[in-house]
Image (cartoon, rainbow, N blue to C red):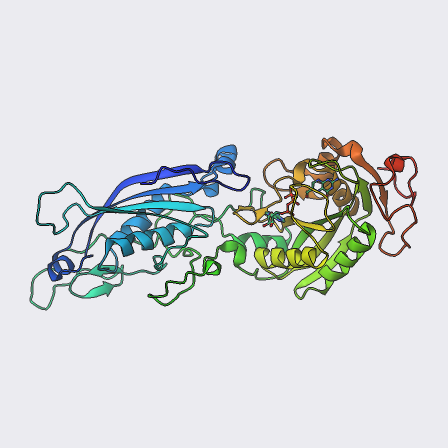
Amino acid sequence: MSDEDVAGRGGHRLDRIRLTGVSATGYHGVFPHERREGQTFVADVVAHVDTRRAAATDDLAHTLDYGALAEQVVAVLAGEPADLIETVAERIAATVLGHPQVQAVDVAVHKPQAPITVPFGDVVVEVRRDRTWLPAAEPLAADAPRWHPVAGPSPASAPAEPDPAGEPLAVVPAPVAPAPVVPAVPALAPPDPDPLALAAATTVLPAAPPPADPPGPVPGPVLPEARPADDDVVDAELVQDALDAAPDGPVEVVLAIGSNLGAAQDTLRDAVADLAAVPGVEVLDVSALARTAPVGGPEQPDFLNAVVIARTTLSPRDLLRATSGIEQAHGRERQVHWGPRTLDIDIIVYGHVSAVTDDLELPHPRAHERAFVLQPWAQVRPDAVLHGLGGGPVAALAATAPDRDGVRWLALDWLTAPVPAALPDPGAADDAAAADPLGRLDP
Ligand SMILES: Nc1ncnc2c1ncn2[C@@H]1O[C@H](COP(=O)(O)OP(=O)(O)OP(=O)(O)O)[C@@H](O)[C@H]1O
Ligand SMILES: Nc1nc2c(c(=O)[nH]1)N=C(CO)CN2
């Protein structure tokens, strides 16, 4: 199997969960006797994931449960027959990628009893698939039946029956209940009494059942949509995860907006209006405007930052699409990491959802250490609590954040007040702290 590293966001090597030698009797093969009699198939799986959150919390709910994974692999091996072990490998890869926290997967399917006419040790097909190089087969369906060589699919709950010839059925793969699926990363915080937030946490990322639970009706994996079997144009959009699911009801979200290029205050005002105009987004509150020293990146002008509290019925990823669209409409370019920008919109929290995926991380992974986010947030929601790793009461985090001294001033009426002459270029005057052009709040 490929031993090449898989890089996660930021270029770091992803961690690996390796499961080897999972075996089951399956009915794959092109020959009738293979379909009839079955043989042993063995699979090795390496899931490439970021295990830090699970390790930090020592919580199974934040990683891939290898027990559940093994059951899913067996269900594919012992499931619907395919002619080729290539197809079996793709099905396993698709099933493993159904776990949103898995960024890439290596699968090897061995067929040690393959009908080969010369002595041989093993024959194995190895594939690596990820979210850009997608599997070319369907994943295991949540309600996949076990396979019977004579009768075909049969409900997992049905007892073995004699076959028409009066003989007991020869080989019935072990009943495999659809494996419980570990959610992307469920909320770390205790359930929020706010029914909206709770709905978000439980609907978007359902909590994992405790490992000791007997197999029962559990939600299946969030799977790629069906596609024609021989469609070799693989559409990256087809792989979905829990962050694509719309919530049952409106969810409160916190968005951080920032700008340090062009007419920053006008841009931020427009951004608030643009957000309010997105169908499925209702702006509830907008914080004071902060003038902040740049954190990280090259030398650049001060930022203007604010926080928007909104309510949304969009899925987390649809919300990200909407915010990215607004950034682009305001001429956002990504040339320099943490470089100057006309408009930046970060999703700080989406209800109590916690998730780490390639394109969206919730809560925003750096929010807990950014006074330019925390101070405006605490100003508009003094009792807010940031959940997740490094979280805590927002006001307290703001008071200790490393960049707290860079938050120069806060202006309350920035949405309605005319833009003062001193403001168009936030980076122009370094003595802005002293010469507060709006003279409102002193942080
Ligand atoms: N919570 C989140 N909010 C917004 N973007 C996110 C989030 N989590 C992950 N991303 C991803 O981050 C990518 C890069 O975002 P962006 O260029 O705005 O980063 P940045 O603002 O320069 O840095 P930072 O993420 O540290 O604020 C986005 O395209 C998006 O897919
Ligand atoms: N003061 C300040 N510094 C930053 C900001 C920002 O909005 N304000 N955004 C960054 C990347 O999102 C990096 N650094």
| Vertical relation: 387 (above or below) 230 | above
Image quadrant, ligand 2: top right
Q: In the image as oriented, which residue stretches furthest toward the front? A: 335
Q: Position of residue 26 (x, y in %)?
A: 20, 54
Pick the quarter of the image with the C terminus: top right
- In this view, 275 is above or below 258: below
Q: Does residue 44 appear left or right of residue 403 in this picture? A: left
Count the marks: how many?
Answer: 0
Image coords of residue 264 (percent x, y): 80, 50
Q: Nearer the viewer, residue 24 or 329?
A: 329
Percent from the top left, x then y, of residue 309? 72, 53
Q: Residue at horizontal 72%, vertical 33%?
A: 401
The front one of 151 and 44 is 44
Q: Quadrant of the N terminus?
A: top left
Residue at the (35%, 51%) spot, across then down: 93
Which residue occupies the foreground of this view, 405 or 132?
A: 132
Q: Residue at x 32, y 40 (%)?
A: 19
User: Height in image: 400 above or below 86?
Assistant: above
